[in-house]
Image (cartoon, coloured by chain):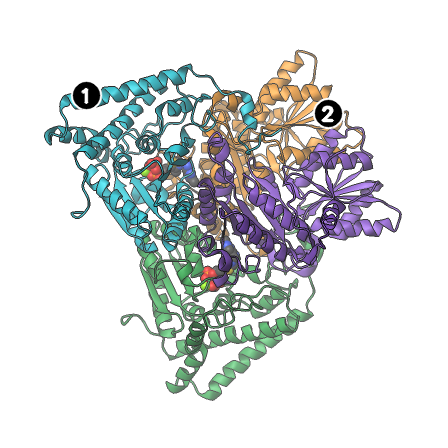
Chain colours: A purple, B orange, C green, D cyan
Amino acid sequence: MTDTITASDAQASAASQGVEPKKMTMVDAINLALHDAMDADPKVLVLGEDVADAQDGGVMGVTKGLSTRFGVDRVKSTPISEQAIIGAAIGAAVGGYKPVAEIMLMNFIAVPMDMIFNHAAKLRFMSGGQTGVPMVIRTMTGSGFSTGGQHSDYLEAWFAHMAGIKVVAPSTPDDAYGLMRAAIDDPDPVLFIENMPSYWTPAPVTKQAIPIGKARVAREGSDVTIIGHSLMVTLSLAVADKLAAEGVSVEVVDLRTISPWDRQAVIASVRKTGRAVVAHEAVKQFGIGAEIASVITEELWGELKGPVQRVGAAYCAVPFSKPLEQAFAPSADTIEAAVRKALA
Amino acid sequence: MTDTITASDAQASAASQGVEPKKMTMVDAINLALHDAMDADPKVLVLGEDVADAQDGGVMGVTKGLSTRFGVDRVKSTPISEQAIIGAAIGAAVGGYKPVAEIMLMNFIAVPMDMIFNHAAKLRFMSGGQTGVPMVIRTMTGSGFSTGGQHSDYLEAWFAHMAGIKVVAPSTPDDAYGLMRAAIDDPDPVLFIENMPSYWTPAPVTKQAIPIGKARVAREGSDVTIIGHSLMVTLSLAVADKLAAEGVSVEVVDLRTISPWDRQAVIASVRKTGRAVVAHEAVKQFGIGAEIASVITEELWGELKGPVQRVGAAYCAVPFSKPLEQAFAPSADTIEAAVRKALA
Amino acid sequence: MSNWPKPDAATLLEIYRKATLIKQNDEHVIKQMMAGKLVMPYYSPRGQEIIPSAISVSLDDDDYICTIYRGIHDMLAKGFPLDEMWAELAGKVTGTCKGKGGPMHLTCPEKGMMVTTGIVGSSMPIATGLGWAAKLDGRNRVSVANFGDGATNIGAFHESMNMAAVWKLPVIFLCQNNHYAEHTAPEYSRAIDRISDRAAAYGMPGVTVDGNDPDEMYGAAKVAIERARAGEGPTLIEAMTFRFNGHIFGEAGHYMDKSIYAEAQTKDPMPILRARLLSEGIATEADLVAIEKEVDSRIVAAIEAAMAADFPDVAELKRDVFAEEIA
Amino acid sequence: MSNWPKPDAATLLEIYRKATLIKQNDEHVIKQMMAGKLVMPYYSPRGQEIIPSAISVSLDDDDYICTIYRGIHDMLAKGFPLDEMWAELAGKVTGTCKGKGGPMHLTCPEKGMMVTTGIVGSSMPIATGLGWAAKLDGRNRVSVANFGDGATNIGAFHESMNMAAVWKLPVIFLCQNNHYAEHTAPEYSRAIDRISDRAAAYGMPGVTVDGNDPDEMYGAAKVAIERARAGEGPTLIEAMTFRFNGHIFGEAGHYMDKSIYAEAQTKDPMPILRARLLSEGIATEADLVAIEKEVDSRIVAAIEAAMAADFPDVAELKRDVFAEEIA
Ligand SMILES: Cc1ncc(C[n+]2csc(CCOP(=O)(O)OP(=O)(O)O)c2C)c(N)n1
Ligand SMILES: Cc1ncc(C[n+]2csc(CCOP(=O)(O)OP(=O)(O)O)c2C)c(N)n1
Ligand SMILES: [Mg+2]
Ligand SMILES: [Mg+2]
């Protein structure tokens, strides 16, 4: 048995305390997590373009209210200077603070890559543990909004391949709250990937911290396991619903943390079902699905009923035109087709 | 049958023309390729820090002689400005030239990631084919020289996961010459990864262009296939030699091109041997070995004698201290152990 | 400045024609978006019409420009074909990028419109490279980099300004200072007043002009272009202006200071130039109405053609990734 | 400048003591490398001794510094423990970073030595963040960013200078201008003479001083530090100097202009300061020899301890990746 958290646990625990979990959007859940974290610890800081209230609390409103409540010394709107934003966060972290830096969209994270890769992820190791970089980088992405080639890429694979940084990606408001609290409390740098398609769907938020490194069985099943994160979890649950009507029992594992990922939970699930599909919105080639599929295959050699199926975006930039954009990214249909292939 | 090029082809063809292939180092082979390409096409340009002769023709001397021969308008030493270096190369490429830009060490490629990822790799697609970016980015890496955490990472996985850019990595002087000529002639951006440990070992150079996208069987064998690039090929050949004495027949496939990689050649080899080891010096987790292992497993489901073994660096920054640095990166011993595991 | 060249009557009229195209095009885009017929992020250039109009009259198709997400005005002024632009906005296969680029990546090499980027600051290094190409070509071409005030705080600005100056490249760095960068007013992003003062850090001439004034904008642009064509190197022009429709279509604009906005509106360049053309006798009301009508009918025709055209086939996902179609 | 504070005799002697440690340490490193006993990339600070020595006398352990691959002088002046430094150079587990960082990543938070980076330009954004932390701490701490002349052409310089100025952070941007950036002379990398002129682009004071002159360097540093401590914001100091041993240990140096090199040698700060201490009667020959001997014996002891220490265990690969050891 693994100590994976199941979907019902958190709600059960909230219910057992007699609390009716409030429904809120992911935007509001993150906003609340930031408020609560800043309240709980005066070392928590927020910085990024437009994050303060004079700038409307972020272009998406995720940081609304923070500077009014905690002051503009702790909540700083920055110039458009991604290298300096991450550099400032690293310096503040090394100096004992817990900054939460926003890189508005994931594509812009290519700008401060040096700061993240050569510095944030490495300072603890290179200093032999004398310093550490307890910072969070919030960023957002997701195709489907006709923003074209430079505004909706998923790049989690770059960071999963980078020693010294953790990568988390919530698929629900509850996870967004819990993972944000855990990320801020974590002594190491955490990349926190938000996804725009999930921003405005309200769902219950229990306000529990969610451990980094643990996956969640979002739906139990016995015939095949779908492993995913972010929007892919939502799509996979829809596929599971649809296939249930045909008598196919689909288990859905929400990674929650992409790196270091919960091998134990994933292996336990696939050991049970014997079949796996890994889905991500990033380009399929050399995406995180390859690592997960490889480890499943290594660990369950001889036990799998077929090769692990991988689902990912087409090998091209995100196209603008609607029909192309739709065909580019994995959809419920693409995932369903992969599940059927796994079952074949 | 695949149309993979075997080790002996190029030399045979050189020999058949009555030419005795000259031995030279990889440094000299790249230098020669740049000379020949600039000679052949006045549109070929070179830029980077210290590349001109007033700056000694590069800190490693790879670009020595070029500015003296072709002038300082075509061979430009730049300020330390990696974003402007790649930007200038992109602009020149869009304007009809074929720039070869040097990013001195692979770790520094994190600085111009936006230019590479959001621009060089995407302009052709986003413009619907109206523009293209026929540029080469030369960069160098490789651990073993006590340079510590920021000077010897392999990051090919980032670029393999990026649509619109090709990635090549020579393991011999002959490949360095041939792949450089092909990369310069290619209509699309090519990342050309040099490795310092292979810089100064002389070997024959036949001066043939080597097609991008084609692997090379560096050694034929029947029991197990090792797939690798850069220094890993050299180490794998040594392992093959050693195991031959024990009667184990190892085939070594040199990828040459990491993206788009030669699936056909790799699959053909593993179909024959039934066992595969993928080796790279980059961190193992989420490295290119995962994609290659996944595709092998998908394509040869039911035909493999065991799971594909993956060899890569430890999950940490490159350590300075000698014993740690040695333990960090894959060695002939690590590869040998993986081969034995594959054979077990 | 007093010794700058001034636009003659015909040039002023040409500037008005371009600016009118930009303004009316903007109105049509907004109308189509409100009607749900165009779905895209839209960064309106309303208020910034004069800047590209007054520089473009001194540029040829052969000259390069790079611009940004808020760049439709730059492109229209440079002669970007209307039909292909509208088809691209609608995501159609007849679009200039076959629908693959969309509004943030409009490209038209025949008109010198080489790169449109959505990444702040990134137009500059690429325009620098085009300047290098132009210099090597030996054809007196220039390369114009368009960018906003906010972009002057990012590293790519610094690196490319410096490189262009050291290499004496024929680049015009055209900063369209519309006061805001998304929701950020200048006091939050720089501790100096004039962005053009940054040119001194690179040994490059820098000048601040009223970007809404065709005389100043034309003069400064002409001087910079001639300097570039003469091989004397790059110039930074800071053109003061304002964006009346906020950062992006649909935003609330709470961050905007009401008095700054109101003050800017008194400087809306379009009614000012129109009144001037009449008062200086450069055109009659009938002339101007004719221009406005002609422009409008061209736009309407482009919209109709765009709406009637086909979407690209999904096979396009495999094309233009590389020169050779992928399998 | 005339109104700058001047170092008193004791301070001058302290500067000499620090500078001597730097110079002699350099000689010992080179000796060990020649003997094959240290294997590492080494960027000698020979010639740049006065800069960090003259600033460090005005800094506490509490003040932060960030430096670069060529930064051993900055660290020694700041009080970096010799034993742990040498053990680190030798890759030993007793090194300050347990041998995992090496010469390019020496770190010692107790002495305020927070980050050493091998990536050009990257000391600046991080020092800016430390300046933010210092400001929030409210303890009058300052943060010093060290970097070279070549680093002033990279984007990170621009972004962090600007951010520090806008946020009025207590940061001293200390550019050690040693004429070359690897093999590149300044005329190939910038079109202006004085790097300190770049400060104006950020609304920050900028000053160029003779970094080899303890008076000028001490004065400029002191003024900048007080300004920072007083909450008035950052300063850029360009300290002119030279590196006598080239970019990296073992290089040929063909790119160096012989007359520039010869001219620089006449300004070697070490013999000049030594002669001054004697001529001004601040110290006797015997005093100086005593300092030099004491410094030498400390270094020799550190080397011996380092050579005798153990290498780290390979299990260290799993430690310090994260705070929690990985499985
Ligand atoms: C590197 C990067 N960071 C952030 C953004 C998000 N963003 C888009 S436009 C913009 C403001 C740019 O302001 P300015 O340069 O003044 O141009 P304007 O939009 O006012 O024309 C920002 C921050 C981006 N596109 N790229
Ligand atoms: C981003 C980056 N680009 C290139 C290099 C390679 N490199 C190391 S030192 C150096 C020269 C730096 O010159 P300068 O800033 O003047 O410092 P100095 O070495 O003279 O002290 C270069 C180009 C690097 N380390 N980082
Ligand atoms: Mg603006
Ligand atoms: Mg220097």
- Residue lying furthest top: B245
Q: Nearest the camera: C205 or A204?
A: A204
Residue ID at (47%, 74%) = C19
Q: Is residue C4 left or right of residue A104?
A: left
Relative vertical location of residue A145 with respect to residue C212 in this rendering, above or below:
above
Residue ID at (17%, 48%) = D3
Q: Residue B64 at x, y = what percent?
A: 39, 33
Relative vertical location of residue D65 with respect to residue A31 in this rendering, above or below:
above
Quadrant assignment, res A184: top right
Q: Residue C151 at x, y = what percent?
A: 44, 57
- Quarter of the render that holds ligand 4: top left
Q: Quadrant of the C terminus of chain A?
A: top right
**Label 1 sits on residue:** D289
Note whether residue B226 is visible.
yes
Query: Callout 2, which amino acid?
Result: Arg
**Label 2 sits on residue:** B275
Question: Which chain is home to disc 2?
Answer: B
